[in-house]
Image: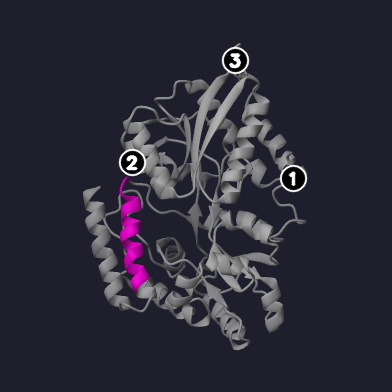
Amino acid sequence: MLGVRTAALVVILLLAACGTARRAPVAQGPEPQRLTVQAAGGEGELKAVRELISSFEQANAGVQVEFVGVPSQGDHIAKLSTSFAAGSPPDVFLLNYRRLGPFVQRAVVAPPDGDDLDLYPGPVEAFTYSGELACLPTNASSTVAYLNEDLFARAGVPLPAADWTWTDLETAAKALDAKNIPAMGFDVGVRVVAPFVWTAGGEIVDDTDAPTRTTLDSAAGRRALAYLTGLQAYGVDATARAAADPADQFAAGRLAIYFDSRRAVPSLRKADVAFDVRPLPRANAARPSASLLASDAYCVAKASQSPELAASLARFAAGGPGATVPALRPLAQSEAFLDPAQRPRSSQVFLDVLPDLRRLPNVAVEDEAEEAADDLLAQLFAGKAGLEQTAAAVDAATAEVYGRG
């Protein structure tokens, strides 16, 4: 049975999905209408999709939706590729904008009808390919800093202000470390590095729409890498990261600061950790803050046997309740989403950072380019390669991948 908060979100979602009064309800027939939806994610994310599907079925009598939940993004993309090649794709599938390229390039998605939806511009732009919106965004999350309130209190360190800087973060990390509290933890890769490059005044790629290489081998890129590798001295280094994922360490209450998007919230609430959030720190007080857009959308397969029903579900799901920040503005700004009785108390942070969100490319080879970069960055953060060597190697490796795309 849906909880009070989820029920409130569903009511808002139903109103948003209805659109204008001219939209007719899905036609009902004697035989059940069937759809298949495929998505990937963690426990909280997949649970949110199941609840959304259940709400859609309740709102449309006679509709049956089969849900295919895949635990990893890699398996999700492989399964989608195989099903499209076989001519039997799911009617609707959830896709991150960074993995959009191959599907629009192969012209297998049907453009959505969502002009009247009040969606945040960031995710809309991320899912726009060659001037056309390809899929309907459902969230507009961002990378933020998660803070363990109990560990900060135990160390006697005040929680940082919303406009904190790299210096403030390092000062807090040193103070926590001095009390034998592991301070810092984050996943190694382009998604963590990018916001620090941006706030240092640099770019992560030479052209977001038509990238030819990453640009870590720049003054801002090297500065961001030096700062992040230095933070490892106050928390989770490569050895500790190999032993236990930083996300799991934070959820277990053993880590004071962790970088992630809002996808971490459901598992942290379940773990009953006393946590709050802050925007990522800026390089200095004169620099604007920056964060990375994390956005997914519901895409409709052109090969769907029930295209109108599939489009109706995608529209229903746009901005729907889930593990991250709704892309639908009224839902994101609702009391149900910002509920101060739920952690984090500073949920408004997720909305405050929206104007500062930047994105990575959505070209067909983006996944491959990021994988090449992440492998090299892992060597740097493990102390097995030098900073300048790594920055140059990342730029060269991604240039080769982008060149093929």
Disc 2 residue type (three-letter):
Pro
The residue identified by callout 1 is 5
Q: Compare marks 2 and 1 and give the one earlier in the sequence.
A: 1
Region of the chain picked out in magenta, as a range? 364-379
How far across and down, in percent of the image, does residue 294 sit?
A: 50, 52
> In the image, is residue 58 part of the stretch drawn in magenta?
no
Disc 3 residue type (three-letter):
Ala
Disc 1 residue type (three-letter):
Arg
How far across and down, in percent of the image, does residue 142 sit?
A: 54, 56
Q: Which residue lies furthest to the bottom in this view?
A: 178
In the picture, residue 151 is in which quadrant?
Answer: bottom right
Along the line of sight, the residue nearer the viewer: 327 or 4: 4
The residue identified by callout 3 is 27
The residue identified by callout 2 is 102
Circles 3 and 2: CB atoms closer than 8 Å: no
Residue drawn at (51%, 66%), measured in percent from left and top?
Answer: 288
How far across and down, in percent of the image, does residue 350 sit?
A: 61, 56
